[in-house]
């Protein structure tokens, strides 16, 4: 029987990060390692396996051997994390680790109160929370990096299950001094000529012809914090779902959009057919309860 390579779980994690992010720099940042340290980890793994995992001319591209290793490495890491979490929970009498990801707007403006309540109720549970766009949240769930995700359904991947939680209506977001800030509602036609700033969230409007003008803007900002800072200074206006606007912002106004009323759906995404750890199952129940209390919950 051939000897097995002496590889740590960190080697497999680093390999998965580079393969999935297709960038050593991004993988190093996600792993909280320097890029040279992560590169060394990959080289060690290749040396101990006796085969290259990434092409020499393009280190972000998997070799055929690397492609074959990818699902096995993912399965190993997922199994390790499930077992480690279960053992930790048993050892600490109901503790464990909860890993979840959420779209940034929910993580910033909807989850803090819930996380505080969870921490008070289950202080022994270690909590790891990541924020990303909906595509990123789904990728993290598929990769086994998190157990739960809160996002909009985007990929229709059959490996994922999605449970609707709430609906979040889109509206005009502008400085409180803007002429439209005091309106009870505005129509899509009324805002078409305004200096609108584009953002990644507008891809959710692609199926609505009345909002088609939002998909081709001269000014585009990918970072939500930067976008909100611009709006607070009166630099343009934009369209966001209600949860994307800080509820206590003194400088911003949210005006609901009508004709038509467009909503995004947010919910819980997880791996289909997989049971949740006790820590994740408790968070899932708290998410459902908060959605119902918010008045936006999906019946």
Image (cartoon, grey):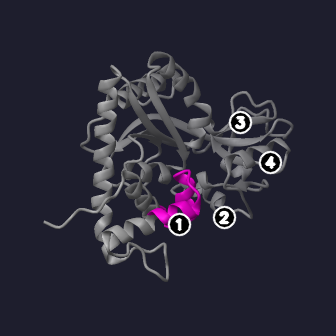
Mark 1 sits on what residue? Answer: 23
Marks 2/1: CA–CA distance: 28 Å
Marks 3/1: CA–CA distance: 38 Å
Q: How many dots with numbers?
A: 4
**Circle 1 SS class:** loop
Mark 2 sits on what residue? Answer: 216
**Quadrant placement of the C terminus:** top left
- Range drawn in magenta: 21-41
Choose the circle earlier in sequence order: 4 or 3: 4
**How many residues crowd around disc 1 within 10 Å: few (fewer than 14), some, or many (20 or more)?**
some
Residue in the image at 51% along x and 52% along y: 31
Mark 4 sits on what residue? Answer: 230
Instruction: Classify 188 as above or below 86.
Output: below
Residue 158 seen anywhere in this rendered image of the structure: no
Expressed as whole percent of the image width and height from the top left, the position of residue 29 reads 57, 55
**How many residues crowd around disc 2 within 10 Å: few (fewer than 14), some, or many (20 or more)?**
few
Instruction: Classify 39 as above or below 295.
Output: below
**Circle 4 SS class:** helix
37 part of magenta stretch: yes
Residue 164 seen anywhere in this rendered image of the structure: yes
Mark 3 sits on what residue? Answer: 254
Instruction: Identify which residue, 62 or 107, lies in the foreground.
Output: 62
Choose the circle earlier in sequence order: 2 or 3: 2
Choose the circle earlier in sequence order: 2 or 1: 1
291 relative to 75 in the view: left or right: right
Residue in the image at 84% along x and 40% along y: 178
Marks 1/4: CA–CA distance: 30 Å
């Amino acid at each position: 029987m051939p000897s097995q390579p002496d590889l740590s779980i960190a080697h497999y994690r680093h390999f998965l990060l580079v393969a999935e992010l297709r960038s050593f720099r991004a993988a190093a940042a996600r792993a909280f390692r320097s890029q040279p340290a992560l590169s060394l980890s990959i080289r060690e793994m290749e040396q101990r396996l006796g085969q290259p995992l990434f092409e020499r001319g393009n280190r972000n591209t998997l070799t055929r051997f690397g492609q074959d290793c990818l699902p096995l490495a993912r399965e190993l890491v997922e199994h390790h994390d499930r077992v480690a979490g279960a053992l930790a929970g048993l050892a600490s009498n109901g503790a464990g680790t909860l890993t979840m990801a959420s779209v940034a707007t929910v993580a910033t403006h909807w989850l803090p109160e819930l996380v505080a309540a969870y921490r008070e109720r289950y202080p022994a549970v270690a909590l790891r929370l990541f924020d990303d766009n909906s595509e990123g949240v789904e990728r993290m769930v598929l990769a086994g990096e998190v157990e739960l995700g809160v996002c909009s359904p985007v990929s229709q991947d059959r490996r994922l299950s999605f449970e609707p939680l709430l609906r979040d209506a889109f509206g005009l977001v502008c400085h409180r001094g803007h002429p439209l800030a005091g309106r009870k509602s505005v129509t899509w036609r009324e805002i078409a000529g305004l200096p609108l700033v584009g953002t990644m969230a507008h891809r959710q409007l692609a199926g609505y012809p009345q909002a088609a003008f939002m998909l081709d803007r001269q000014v585009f900002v990918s970072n939500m914090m930067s976008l909100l800072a611009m709006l607070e200074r009166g630099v343009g206006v934009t369209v966001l779902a209600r949860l994307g606007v800080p509820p206590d912002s003194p400088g911003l106004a949210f005006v609901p959009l009508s004709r038509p009323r467009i909503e995004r759906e947010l919910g819980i995404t997880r791996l289909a057919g997989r049971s949740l750890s006790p820590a994740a199952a408790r968070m899932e129940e708290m998410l459902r309860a908060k959605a119902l209390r918010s008045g936006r919950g999906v019946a």
